[in-house]
Amino acid sequence: MKENIDEIDAYFNKKGEPTEAENVKQGHWAMEKASINPTRRKLLRLVGVFGKTEEQLKEESGLNDFFFKFHMDLLLNDKFLKLENGMYRLTDTGISLHDSVC
């Protein structure tokens, strides 16, 4: 029996893993997205090299729960921040972004 595969499934099955150029382009796009937003720059600056808890960041940033989660999710998903033992910390990529825009 033949599987029912539509054109979209066939395209994504054929596409495979991203190339190195696509990975670099995605990384640059993520850095631009984080660096042009003043709230994200502020959050990176607040986390700093020692890290902060969620409560400290919320208090110091003055963001409500919705906007805090929105910006932190973006920074976490793009791997600028990581959450370790209840502390937000900069990743290596986050440190380089912090050094260039903060």
Image (cartoon, grey):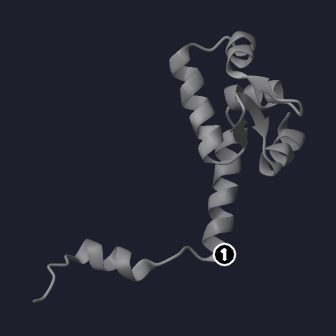
Q: Is residue 48 left or right of residue 62?
A: right
Q: Is residue 69 left or right of residue 54?
A: left
Q: The residue under label 1 is which amino acid type?
A: Glu
Task: Name the residue nearer the viewer: 62 or 86.
Answer: 86
Task: Name the residue nearer the viewer: 15 or 51.
Answer: 51
Q: Which residue is drawn at the image coordinates 78% and 46% (left, top)?
A: 91
Percent x, y for residue 100? 87, 43
95 to 41, vertically: above or below: below
According to the image, label 1 marks what residue? 20
Q: Which residue is drawn at the image coordinates 72% and 19% (left, top)?
A: 57
Percent x, y for residue 43? 73, 27
Q: Quadrant of residue 60?
A: top right
Q: Which residue is drawn at the image coordinates 13% and 88% (left, top)?
A: 2
77 to 60, vertically: above or below: below
65 to 80, vertically: above or below: above
Q: Is residue 49 left or right of residue 27?
A: right
Percent x, y for residue 90? 79, 40
What is the quadrant of the C terminus in the image?
top right
Task: Name the residue nearer the viewer: 67 or 29.
Answer: 67
Of helix, strand and loop, which one carries label 1?
helix
> Residue pushed farthest bottom?
1
Q: Is the residue marked by circle 1 packed among few (<14), some (14-19), or many (20+) residues within 10 Å?
A: few
Q: Quadrant of residue 4?
A: bottom left
